[in-house]
Image (cartoon, coloured by chain):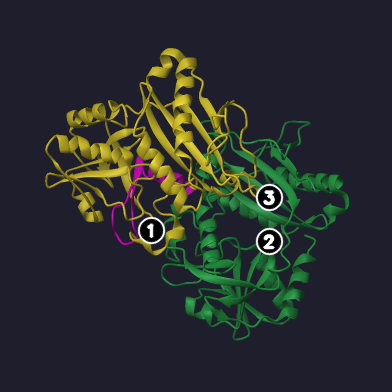
Chain colours: A green, B yellow
Amino acid sequence: MTRATLLTITAPTGTPAEGDAGFALADFDAPQVRITDLSVTRGDGVFETIAVIDGHPQALEPHLARLAHSAQLLDLPEPAAAVWREAVAAGVRDYRERNGEAGSGELFAKLIYTRGVEGSGRPSGWIFVDEGEDFSAQRRGIRVVTLDRGLRHDVAESAPWLLAGAKTLSYAVNRAAQREAVRRGADDVIFLSSDGYALEGPTSNVILLADGVVRTPQTDQGILAGTTQAAVFAFFEERGLATEYREITADELRDADALWLVSSVRMAAPVTDLDGREYPVDAELTAELNRYLLSRTE
Amino acid sequence: MTRATLLTITAPTGTPAEGDAGFALADFDAPQVRITDLSVTRGDGVFETIAVIDGHPQALEPHLARLAHSAQLLDLPEPAAAVWREAVAAGVRDYRERNGEAGSGELFAKLIYTRGVEGSGRPSGWIFVDEGEDFSAQRRGIRVVTLDRGLRHDVAESAPWLLAGAKTLSYAVNRAAQREAVRRGADDVIFLSSDGYALEGPTSNVILLADGVVRTPQTDQGILAGTTQAAVFAFFEERGLATEYREITADELRDADALWLVSSVRMAAPVTDLDGREYPVDAELTAELNRYLLSRTE
């Protein structure tokens, strides 16, 4: 059995003192979070999950930039990128040293940055590194349902306090939506806005192929700008296909020729069924796409 | 300085083993939560905050019932009411024994019930008891702004996966709304539905007096059924006023003769200003209401 690595980020927002790295190894199996940390009591913080393939954290800089963007949307102090970057590297190194052969496959690093213990005024931070689930079945095909996200597509602009587009620790709704999908006999969800636009999955971005163009919902609609989605666009562009960010209606989504949900650790999961309508899966193309995504070394 | 009491709920869902109370004292100042507890990573759990006045937990049974209702909305196993009830009493007893004189004022007990450490399949639970903030200024008057909650008023029924009406640990939006209120020079928020109905505050219920009737937005609109709101209705009914649950439009809210935000620990805070419109405060009535709320012994 492999053993996860946990780091406490002791200087999540600032330059560490001389001789201090700004992070320290901690015991993954022991409690590390105080009950009054606002992550526990209010889901008040942000996170990132980064794939680590053969020891290389993928899209590390876009993930760190998104962590900072989410923090800004929550009025949290800017995370110190240098500290978090070094901590990811140290966490991966430790995991691989301790786990030998088992450390050479698909890992992930989860970055958690919270408003800290209530009343302390000091944010908390942790990173843990562990091996990913086996997503091989999902990389061959998933069944998806659409669910109403309840919010208009333009809510990030009109009501920023709703935190649409921030990757917060308040993910209870995302988890409830995934349970609803399972109740409906599906594996995952594509959220629709209350005014009928396709948005994103609870933990993924949506890619569709239609009219020979590869599209994803434009990210000013309270959608997380996907780090993997950007790599998927690069893959298709290298193959000569046009790519496009734009508003996509629920009807356009359903009329697509092919659909994928893409995310940092699962990579690309082709949709075989959306709300009961079947989609053909080009298994070879998807396998090639996943090989491309898994081969990224930065 | 007083010292908070923390209890770990060792049997949050079941009958404890013979000789085990189902809860145990823990060190409030030490970390108690694992980093992979889903409360930390996903805000995936529910909570209650109960006022404790002169050693009496107020509205304990309604709070326990609401904890169970929230848990049900999140597909969590039913919490074992007997264990949680005993644990609240034990926590209050311990706090008062250790803090002497300081334990005889206004305390609160916070109940936290989570989906547990990811992969364990076992929920986690904690209760902590501490003294409340000094709310005396807020009990004399608060400035409030309305903010769009982004969701239609009927979303609890049409989209239960959005968890409207569940008191979840995913409160980042509630906190962001309160920061937005401060940016606007106010103290607190009344959320409006996207279709123009008054809902609730981020941590309170809304009470309005209009046409000689005391009203609150009806609770099938994804609003938490307020334990304090129920006591406020009892107070006014004892004084011969009619009370009513109904849909209240934003215009009706603004046209009210008087407004209060009510919650379990702050009690009743009269609104002096809503979106820049001033409201007269009947200081004597509000003081009497708060004495009533603070005098409840069950």
B120 relative position to A134: left or right: left
Q: Is residue A247 above or below residue B181?
A: below
Which quadrant holds the C terminus of chain B? Answer: top left
Q: Inspect the image, locate mark 1, and give the three-letter code of the amino acid beneath it.
A: Ala
Instruction: Give B196 or B109, whichever is nearer the viewer.
Output: B109
- Mark with earlier residue (3, 2): 3
Mark 2 secondary-structure assignment: loop
| Type of the residue with mark 3 | Lys
Q: Residue furthest bottom?
A: A211
Q: Which residue is mark 1?
A: B156
Judging depth in this view, the residue of B156 and A168 nearest the camera is B156
Q: Secondary structure at mark 1?
A: helix
Discs 2, 1 touching: Cβ within 8 Å: no
Pointer 2 chain:
A
In the image: residue A285, left or right of residue B261? right
Looking at the image, can residue A78 be seen?
Answer: no
Mark 1 belongs to chain: B
- For the question of whether residue A80 can be seen, the reply is yes
Rounded to the nearest whole Å, what is the CA distance between mark 3 and mark 2? Answer: 11 Å
Residue A110's label in the rendered image is 3
Q: Residue at x 74, y 59 (%)?
A: A58
The residue drawn where x is 85% and y is 44% is A98
Which region of the structure is painted magenta? B171-200
Instruction: Give the spatial CA distance, label 2 vs label 1.
Output: 32 Å
Residue B284: give x, y in percent of width and height.
Answer: 18, 28
Residue topped by disc 2? A264
Specify few, some or many for label 1: CA neighbours under 10 Å numbering under 14, 14-19, or 20 or more.
Answer: many
Structural crowding at the residue carrying mark 2, measured as other residues with C-alpha within 10 Å and reported as few (<14), some (14–19) or many (≥20)? many
Q: Is residue B14 left or right of residue B155?
A: right
Quick check: A157 left or right of A40?
left
- Residue A52 rendering spot, x and y as whole percentages: 76, 56
